Image: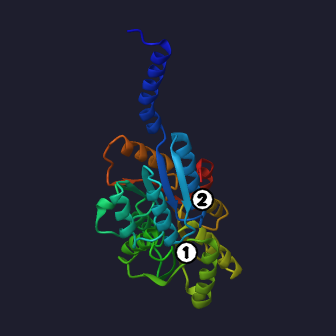
Amino acid sequence: MNIPRRTVLAATAAAALASALPAMAQKKIVLGFSQIGAESEWRTANSESIKQSAKDAGIELKFSDAQQKQENQIKAIRSFIAQKVDVIAFSPVVESGWGTVLREAKAAKIPVILTDRAVNEKDDSLWVTFMGSDFVEEGRKAGRWLVDKMKDAKGEVNIVELQGTVGSAPAIDRKKGFEEIVKADPKFKIIRSQTGDFTRAKGKEVMEAFLKAEGKKINVLYAHNDDMAIGAIQAIEEAGLKPAKDIVIISIDAVKGAFEAMMAGKLNVSVECSPLLGGQLMQAVKDLKAGKTLPKRIVTEEGIFPMEVAAKEFPKRKY
């Protein structure tokens, strides 16, 4: 029986298309990412790293900015579930209140990756991995640096603390790690502790209140991030005091703004917390799609930068 050539060609083309369809479907992995907002230099660098890395990896990114509101993040995650994305990743604005939406993602069989911040949920099967820094260890590094710096100080060392966003993992853990170290020596006293919400403006405002209340009693400022420290530096100068001399200043993140402050002699030390998680995140997304098992915890490697090394290290900073 002679089959017309056109029919054979059509059948061949259809077969080729059918075999190509799964490959085409596999090509574009879709990642839904809910970001906290843009409250700091760190967060902006974090968002840029994720967007650029998704582009480089050929991953379709659905990016949502929550403007520091948990309800916006929950809405975004529900939207990702409805859109049937392949993977959901997010940086939780606070630790608690995620159980319901995470169970919805699990029921939809969409794996969830936590980036930068953890959640406080007993059922750890609700996410596949938590990728980011060890915030408790960052607090400890800040504490160890201070204990060493002040080892010869006579009398009490009065510390004021600018905390991050209330209820957020970095605020809770950076406080915990720092206190764990300094409480070993009774001369270290945290005399005031208040949230500056990780922002420069709030850091300045709260530091002004600390200075009004405690004045020259303050020996040390411990800020949970560089942006708050930079805001506080302004308040210290406006009060007629010399930052990094009259008040020792310790902060966390090690963004370029902190290095500039250190080079200007206004900040004593910054503990690194790298925002450049994009590459690691895209690799994890690809591994998940390839059926690989991810470790439950992926920790980023980080250092500590005192004022003395700032000028040498500054040219190497990417954020």
Q: Mark 1, residues whose alpha carbon is within 10 Å: few (<14), some, or many (≥20)?
A: many
Residue at disc 1, secondary structure: loop
Q: Residue at x 46, y 74 (%)?
A: 152
Which callout, 2 or 1, points at the residue further toward the start of the chain?
Answer: 2
**Up-down: is 32 above or below 74?**
above
**Up-down: is 171 above or below 56?**
below
Colouring of the image: rainbow
User: In the rendering, which numbered label is found on residue 63?
Assistant: none
Residue at disc 2, secondary structure: helix
Q: Quarter of the image holding residue 123?
A: bottom left
Position in image of residue 276 (x %, y %): 52, 52
Q: Residue at x 30, y 46 (%)?
A: 293
- Residue 102 visible at all: yes
- Which of the image's four quarters has the N terminus? top left
User: In the rendering, which numbered label is found on residue 197?
Assistant: 1
- Which of the image's four quarters has the C terminus? bottom right
Q: Identify which amino acid the numbered label 2 is placed on.
A: Thr
Direction front: furthest residue: 1
Q: Residue at x 63, y 54 (%)?
A: 311
Position in image of residue 318 (x %, y %): 59, 50
Q: Quarter of the image holding residue 45?
A: bottom right
In terms of depth relative to the viewer, which is nearer, 227 or 234?
227
Count of residue discs: 2
Q: Identify which amino acid the numbered label 1 is placed on.
A: Asp
In terms of depth relative to the viewer, which is nearer, 56 or 247?
56
Q: Which residue is mark 2?
A: 44
Q: Mark 2, residues whose alpha carbon is within 10 Å: few (<14), some, or many (≥20)?
A: some
Position in image of residue 162 (x %, y %): 53, 77
